[in-house]
Amino acid sequence: MREVAVNNRLALPRVRALATTTGETAHLAVREGDQALFLDHHVAVGRVVTVSGQTGEFVPLHCTAHGKALIADFTAEDLADLFKGAPLRAHARRSVTSLDRLAKICIKVAVDGVATDDGEFMEDLRCVAAPIRDQDGVIIASVGISAPITRFPKSRYAPTARMVAEVANQISASLTN
């Protein structure tokens, strides 16, 4: 795996702005083996109920928006190598537990530029994340938001996905300058 550092100084203001714009908790993550690691997060001000994902927390790749964004370019073979035959654990009723299904999701994320999590990791949580790419187009991180399902209906996916993808593109562009 190619190790490239994300410049938090460049990314953090955009993560904060994403949280403020969406009114939800925003995270910046990188892949660590078969997990995603939250490098940073920002909680939107003024919300009584917030998502508490914390900086330094690990989450699975296969059933989180950040995880799927981080492995969007993986082939079925790459996924098999990554998970080394270990079963994909169900964290919720909707968790992806099949490598074949995960490979199809990766293709969709690569095409769409965003990944979603509709109660796949935590039943009452919806998330959208997008990959951050280095100057060579390699995915090095992800940025996204998480919100309670009650406040994040599916109709909100498309406009939120556009915002998240734009922030990911801005961070990616800042890495090449």
Image (cartoon, helix red, strand yellow):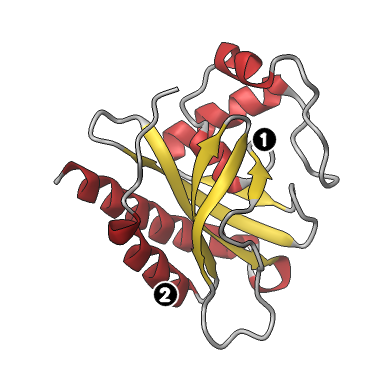
Residue furthest right in the image: 93
Name the secondary structure under disc 1.
Answer: loop
Residue at (40% x, 61% y) in the render:
163
Residue at (35% x, 41% y) in the render:
5
The foreground one among 155 and 104 is 104
Residue 140 image point, x, y percent = 40, 37
The foreground one among 22 and 158 is 22
Horizontal side of residue 84 vs 92, given as left or right: left
Residue at (28% x, 58% y) in the render:
10
Q: What is the crowding at mark 1: few (fewer than 14 residues within 10 Å), some, or many (at least 20)?
A: many
Q: Tell me if residue 177 comes above or below residue 75 in the rendering.
A: below
Q: Tell me if residue 66 comes above or below residue 148 in the rendering.
A: above
Residue carrying label 1: 62
Residue carrying label 2: 21
Residue furthest top in the image: 77
Name the secondary structure under disc 2.
Answer: helix
Residue furthest left in the image: 177
Residue 135 image point, x, y percent = 23, 34
Horizontal side of residue 108 vs 117, given as left or right: left
C-alpha separation, residue under disc 1 versus residue under disc 2: 27 Å
Mark 1 vs mark 2: give the one in front. Answer: 1
Say which amino acid is labelled 2.
Thr
Residue 15 image point, x, y percent = 41, 64
Say which amino acid is labelled 1.
His
Horizontal side of residue 39 vs 175, given as left or right: right
